[in-house]
Image (cartoon, grey):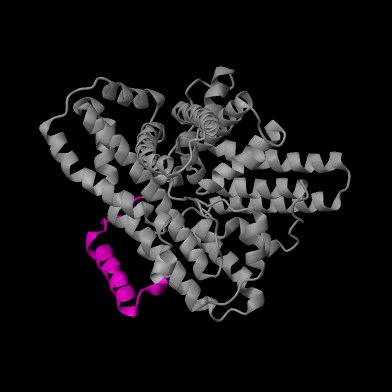
Amino acid sequence: MLFADLEYWIFLGVCLSLYLFVPARGRAGFLLLASYFFYLQRNAEHGLLLAISTVLDYSLALGMGRVKDQGRRKLLLLGSIFGNLGLLAAFKYRVVFSTLAGWLGFAPVGEVTGIESVILPLGISFYTFQTLGYSIDVFRKRIAPCRNFIDYALYVSFFPQLIAGPIERANHLIPQLQSLGGLTKENASAGGRLCLWGLLKKLVIADHMREPLMQSFRDPAAQDSLYLVMTAVGLAVYLYLDFSAYTDMARGTARIFGVTLVLNFNRPFTATGIGEFTRRWHMSLVSWIRDYVHWPLTRGGATGHVALWKANIVILTVFGVWHGAKWNYVVWCVAWGIMISIDGSLRLRALHKRRERGELGRRFRRRSRVRAVAGCLLTGILWSFLVLGLFAGSLTEALAFLSQIAELRPPSRETLQMLAWTLPVLVGLWLAHAAGSVFDLDRVWIRLNTLSRATFVLGSLVALAFLRVKEPLDFVYFRF
């Protein structure tokens, strides 16, 4: 049952209808049951893992709240860390462990005894990081352990953000779940707009792009260099549309119930540098790694160029390992970290020079706008090359694609014709993407009259009815 499936919206409609009659004290319990029903539809066996992770961290956090001895509290935290990461590694790195066992003589090399057929539990990466962050925050005494098991279990399993985030912090989500209100017109309108926007991005645009782009990606030798660059850019756009569509629908569904989830994307393609792009992309995971990996390793932060380079490489390496047991993921993210470090060093150096020269005033601002456009374009292209590592089946496949681009084969007539119509489309998508940076879209919506709102909603529903793909595809980040 996916957000893009009709079954999901039937499920949501039933939930909302029943929720109207649930008393205030029973709302959390009702949503907990609904969340487990939603999750178990995909694979009932994986519900046990979700329950184990929930009970583990709930119990250990209560222990950390009661115990005063710091040594014992550290042991409880280590239990949470190794328990959570152990479950995650057992599924994400099962083939690696099997191969290693073969090398060590515990099993014939290459014999995985069917382990490759084991399905990765949906959302395991996201809810593992969420529960682990909760345990660390309790250990640091930033939050008190949640004593109501239903509230905590709902925090872990809340169905709008269970499968692919955003990764929520306990101090933000649990208080909202403890004070669930009734359904309101304002929340339904705001949440409904987000859901509708997410459906349009997913079904009308993203899913139509996927197969043609992947066909070109799998056979780079058959295409010229410009076509391959267009493919890389298309994959970057597709990834954003697909992942942000899920986030929009997750945030929209939660908002209907009166719950505000954190923003996971902040118009990343308006960024003028790869460092700024990173801060705007998958923000809940990037901030999680910063708070729970970067700061502990650098003892509260990094100062100086060398320390910042080390921190960036560590953060993005963890980011790559999190994505899975493939070298292309790790190399992709390490390259990303190097680009972030270069970008930061150049910007810091340029800032010092501008301050020394006193280059301020209107002329500087006009020139910076031109640089901003160039920065957006360059950042988008760099990200497009980086993101190839996410779609490649292996590091060899990603490098083969890049090597074909490097051959600089002249564009064919068909490629130039395709560029002639895809370029205006990309510009239009970028303008729509950037509109929120110039206008407050919520205020614009409020100021629209009833006829204008109805026209927009009706037009969107017509587009979904006639322009949508026949069969929705899985969201990209369901793999992780």
Q: Is residue 250 above or below residue 81?
A: below
- Kindly report the secondary structure that dominates the magenta region of the rendered protein: helix
User: How far from the left and from the top, in percent, is residue 349?
Assistant: 53, 28
Is residue 303 among the parts visible in the rendering?
Answer: yes
Q: Is residue 185 left or right of residue 416?
A: right
Please name the residue shown 72% across and 33% down the image: 299
Q: Nearer the viewer, residue 43 or 13?
A: 13
Q: Nearer the viewer, residue 197 or 372?
A: 372
In the image as oriented, which residue stretches furthest toward the left?
A: 413
Q: Is residue 305 left or right of residue 444?
A: right
Magenta highlight on residue 465: yes
Q: How many marks?
A: 0
User: How far from the left and from the top, in percent, is residue 151?
Assistant: 67, 63
Question: For the N terminus, which image quadrant?
Answer: bottom left
Q: Is residue 79 left or right of residue 359?
A: right
In the image as oriented, which residue stretches furthest toward the bottom?
A: 21
User: In the figure, residue 287 lies in which quadrant?
Assistant: top right
Magenta-drawn segment: 446-473
Q: Is residue 147 above or below residue 185?
A: above
Magenta highlight on residue 354: no
Is residue 124 among the parts visible in the rendering?
Answer: no
Please name the residue shown 36% across and 60% down the image: 199
Please name the residue shown 10% across and 33% down the image: 413
Q: Is residue 28 above or below residue 76?
A: below
User: In the figure, residue 315 lies in which quadrant?
Assistant: top right
User: How far from the left and from the top, in percent, is residue 255?
Assistant: 51, 67
User: How far from the left and from the top, in percent, is residue 381?
Assistant: 35, 34
